[in-house]
Each structure stands twice: as C-alpha cells, then as structure tokens.
C-alpha cells in the first residue's frame, strides 16, 4: 500500500471535519471547513457559519465505529489532511452535501466533483 494511502479505524469524531483514528493519528478531512466549536474561531479569521454540534453529529453518523479508506494530501496543525471514504462515500462531499461544511482549502484537489 502506498504511504499516502492508509486505513483509519475511527476512535472518535472531534468536530465536523476532524477525527481521531485508533492508531492515534488525527485526521482533518481535506477540501472542507466545518463550523468551529465554541471559542475556536480565532480573531481575524472568517469561520464557517452553522451549528458545530450538528456538523459533528453528521460526521459521527457517517464515521463512528467505521474503518475509513484515506488518502493523505498534506498536514495541518499536527494533523494528517486526507480525503477519506467509507462504503464508497467520500466524507468531505457528504458533509458538504448535508450542509454541514463548505468547500475550502482545495487548490490542487477537486472536491465533490
């Protein structure tokens, strides 16, 4: 398996675009931005509007207790940035389609074609 491809057995979901694998790896879903949890929108930053609790719950429904297939595309704040899917469903696209995240940070990758 390529070093860019990895499996993530989801331990828990942190928020609408971040989760932790049983291996300890923190994964940030690529190409999207979900609403920040209370107090995490830094001054001067334009944060994604919406309900962070609903966004997290939507990702939990998709990913909790699942093993994801992921493709690493970078790193950010000590997290792997990756496109991840389960059962053929791209989690980034699912979050965008459900209105729980917006497309962002995808200069080189096409998100939700």
Image (tube, grey):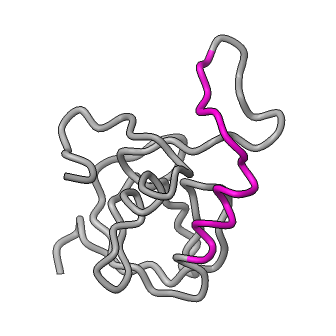
Let me know if residue 48 is in the magenta part: yes
Q: Residue 22 is drawn in which quadrant? A: bottom right
x, y (%) of residue 73? 28, 51
Q: Which residue is pictured at 51% across the width and 47% down the height?
A: 101
Q: Is residue 37 above or below residue 47?
A: below
Left/right of residue 109 with respect to residue 68 in the rendered view: left
Name the quadrant of the N terminus. bottom left
Residue range corresponding to the magenta coloring: 45-61
Q: Which residue is pictured at 38% across the width and 81% down the height?
A: 86
Q: Which residue is pictured at 71% across the width and 22% down the height?
A: 42
- Give whichever of 67, 87 is nearer the camera: 87
Q: Which residue is pictured at 30% across the width and 59% down the height?
A: 72
The furthest residue to the right? 39
Q: Is residue 33 above or below residue 62?
A: above
x, y (%) of residue 56? 67, 60
Q: Is residue 113 above or below residue 90?
A: above
Left/right of residue 51 with respect to residue 66 in the rendered view: right
x, y (%) of residue 15? 66, 56
The furthest residue to the top? 44
């Amino acid at each position: 398996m390529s070093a860019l491809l990895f499996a993530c057995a989801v331990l828990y979901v942190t928020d609408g675009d971040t989760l932790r694998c049983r291996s300890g790896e923190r994964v940030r879903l690529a190409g999207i931005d979900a609403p920040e949890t209370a107090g995490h929108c830094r001054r001067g930053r334009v944060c994604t509007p919406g309900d962070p609790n609903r966004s997290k719950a939507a990702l939990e429904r998709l990913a909790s207790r699942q093993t994801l297939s992921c493709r690493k595309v970078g790193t950010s704040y000590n997290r792997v940035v990756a496109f991840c899917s389960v059962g053929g469903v791209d989690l980034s696209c699912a979050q965008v389609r459900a209105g729980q995240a917006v497309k962002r940070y995808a200069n080189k990758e096409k998100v939700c074609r």
